[in-house]
Amino acid sequence: MLRQIGWIDRRSDEQTILDAAALFVMIGAEPNTEWLGGCIALDSKGFVLTGAQAGATSAYETERPGIFAVGDVRSGSVKRVAASVGEGSVAVQAIHGYLEKSGSSAS
């Protein structure tokens, strides 16, 4: 479960940590996924593998249960904002299903 997000400003070396329950990453057509540090399976170009490519049952779930990816960061995505919004809305239903199965509750 995500509790905090932290980053360092490379220009000033200032570290920032914020409490957060969710994270949305806008990366564009070139993946910026190095920060995943081997946590999630990526394709040869650095895009996140989901669905059948990742051995998951949900189209937007990664190989790590409960971790979903939509939009530009996803391998094989259309790389258009409207498609990303649609994927996100569909993934919400899958996330709710995951949380129900795992006994977690969303607030």
Image (spheres, grey):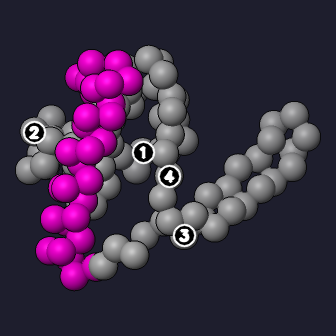
Q: Looking at the image, how many numbered discs can be counted on the residues?
A: 4
Is tag 3's residue or tag 2's residue first in the polypeptide sequence? 3
Q: Label 2's element?
A: helix
Residue 85 quadrant: top left
Q: Distance between the residues labelled 4 and 3?
A: 10 Å
Q: Label 4's element?
A: loop
Q: In this view, does 57 lie above or below 96?
A: above
Q: Label 2 is placed on what type of residue? A: Ala
Horizontal relation, residue 56 to residue 80: left or right: left
Task: Tell whether label 4 touches label 2 (CB within 8 Å).
Answer: no
What residue does disc 2 label? 52
What residue does disc 4 label? 23
Please provide the residue range marked out in magenta: 75-104
Q: Which of marks 4 and 1 is in front?
A: 4
Q: In this view, does 62 lie above or below 107?
A: above
The residue at the far right in this view is: 12
Q: Label 1's element?
A: loop
